[in-house]
Amino acid sequence: MNDKLCILICESFKAEVESTRGALKNEEIEFKYYSMDCINCKRQRQKLYDGLIESAYCSDSVILLPTQKGSGRDENLAGESIFNSCLSLLAGGDLINYLSSMGYYLTTPGWLKRWKHIIMDIYGFNQETAREFFSEYCKKVVLIDSGAYSNILLDLIEFSEYIGMKYEIIDVGLDCFSSTINNSYKNWKVNRLEYILNLKNKQVTDYALVFDFFEKKATLLKREDLIKNIFTLFEMLTGAKHLAFLTVIEHKKGEIVFHQEKLYKSELYDIDNLKFRQSYFLTSSGAGFIFKITFDNELMGYMEVEDIMFPNYMEKYLDLSKTIMIILGIMLFNSKIYEKLIDTNEELLSLNNELEVLVDKRTSQLLEVNGNLEKTNCMLEEEIEEHKLTETKLKAAKEEAERANSAKSQFLANMSHEIRTPMNGIMGMTSLLEFSKLTDEQIDIVKMIETSSKHLLQIINDILDLSVMDVGKIELKPERINIFNLMNESRNLFTYLAENKGLKLEIIVDNNLPNEIILDNGRLMQVLSNLIGNAIKFTEKGKIQVSVDKVEDKANKVKLMFSVKDTGIGIKEEDIPRLFNYFTQLDISASKKFQGTGLGLAISKNIVKLMGGEISVESQYGKGSTFYFTCLFDIASDSKESSNIQKVCIDNKAYHETSILQVEDDIISQRFMNQLCKLAGWKIKIASNGLEALNMLENEDFDIILMDIQMPDMSGIELTKIIREKEKLTGKHITIIAMTAYAMGGDRDICINTGMDDYISKPIEVMKLKEVITKYSNNYK
């Protein structure tokens, strides 16, 4: 990751950048400019971006401004949608959209400085054709003035007279522009710190593994057993394919021991021709090390670690390996003493046999041996003391690793809350767009936003699931589910993605299945979404076939088999055993075609295991793959034919005018709920914090409170306790529903135990929220 943030921006904003740079006083930001060419803007941006990446810039440290999500259907002069996104750098999207809707032609100072070249040279307008064009599409020219140019008025007057239109100036200054630059820097800084923290966590974990290993294995062993254990440790840490040890211990000097007898062209054969200036050097392949192992200036042997799985972590492995080699030198020295002790004991047995014949000689020999044993015992006592000291250090390191793991879990919980809050705004506002009048292209754009949001939310959930699974706290939440409706929901969820790639998606369900079974709907959909999503991702042509079949049923239980078959790229046979491991991606190169976290299949395997089943795969490389998994479910005792699938939208039925108080400090979440309540016919008032909510409750009655948890001054937990204490005096009970971005395991129980009636996690699903509010609204009819 680069030490500086590189921002790519159109050269038309160069004056604004220079005016802002002095105020920011941030040496960690550098700017690169691409030529102003509104018609070919995207190509110009991408060309500069690709050049920076090829010149060793990290993609995480390069930002394109403005962020462009796509072009509009009715683009005209200068690519209106693209140009409007540029304008939003100076004034924000809301103002730009409002002015555009009024029919004004919006422009920036940088554009005005080049208007003749753009209007006359690029578009080929003369004064007559320019006036004809602008009179048809625009009412007035509006300059969004940043104040970066001192004489821009003359250019505006000249341009307005040329096209025969009135003009207006809106002075916005540089606040919005500076805020955009500053927020981009802050987001990059957070991502960079997160990367460094993850790297430190991995280092702590590796050291904990080493210390735990030596705690269990740091005993007196023969040389052969000790070397085998060390081979196992390095195989676990580095994934090295080849390991070897060259001993220099007495009569076995020059003997090379290979890991699991895997012979390869080891550089240890030529060790005499190499000169060690340090305690290690790189092998000729560049993917391994040879270490010189010493103890108290005595050479104990040479260790070769070749074909390390992840060469990018070579320096980290080297730091860790140096520590291991110091401990290994001590253990090899102990092994040397141990083998000498064994030889001495064998010699004692031989002497005992000779005692029957040579009594006099026996006495002198025993005295000599006893003297040697006393020296050996003294040495062993010293080694035991050192061993105790090592144990103390290992225990301290283990406790530090456990604290680091706890800190990691807390960090994930905090990041979950901070990410889910803006995700609630994105997904909520997108769902509201579906109820407005949209063109077909706008509907497609909304669907793409929904798909991307759900994909991002899935990645967030995968990371949280990983944290929960690490400590073994994941639990299933069974409910009655119509299996036919569930599979139809899967079809609706992925049809758009499949058709967008030209693929056919088939869902085949055995008609003999029970209508309703007891299962965790969310977890089952999580597994299906992972498998179907992967099938679509890795298939370029053909079809995806999803099947559900009954394997067996006993009493009130049924065992189902789900299969997802594709005609995609397939999997090599040697790669299949690694598929279900955490963080495993078969292509880990920087130029890989398919993206992903490497968590989905590993998490799916754990979920399927919790559901009493197994997961497996069959694949032919280049022809496609089929993933199978089984699950054991309870059959609902009064299972009936399922009804039609519910419409996932807000209907126009008459409901009781439920009065709602939303306690929420996030402005976007407030606006989302306000719009949703208008559509649903609910009466809503909003309090931005706990103190404001208490004042409103003193003067007005509400049916339901939608309670955020994390707020300034007073949390939702504290506010709920105060409300419940007051209700003990009044005898009333108002329904309180937690609506929070806290979604880790146990957060729901905390809310319910505090006195809340129900719980919904962000991002909010519109239908789920509607069901919960309708459920409690019925109590007030």
Image (spheres, rainbow, N blue to C red):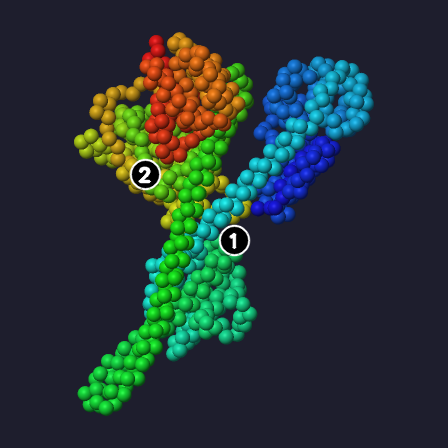
The picture places residue 292, in percent across and down from the top left corner, at: 48, 68
Going by the numbered disc 2, the residue's amino acid type is Val
Near mark 2 (Cα within 10 A), the count class, few <14, some 14-19 or many ≥20, is some
Relative image position of residue 558 (x, y in whole percent): 23, 32
Residue at 21%, 89% in the rendered image = 359
Quarter of the picture containing the C terminus is top left
Q: Residue type at mark 1?
A: Asn
Q: Quadrant of residue 115?
A: top right
Q: Position of residue 279 (x, y in %)?
A: 51, 67
Q: Residue at x 22, y 35 (%)?
A: 552
Q: Quadrant of residue 207?
A: bottom left
Image position of 433 with respect to 530: above or below:
above
Q: Distance between the Cα atoms at labels 2 and 1?
A: 34 Å
Q: Which residue is mark 1?
A: 312
For the residue labelled by badge 1, is the local secondary structure a helix, a strand or a loop?
helix
Front residue (pair 678, 21): 21
Looking at the image, residue 458 lies above or below residue 127: below
Query: Which residue in the structure is indicated by mark 2?
Result: 608
Q: Is residue 274 visible?
A: yes
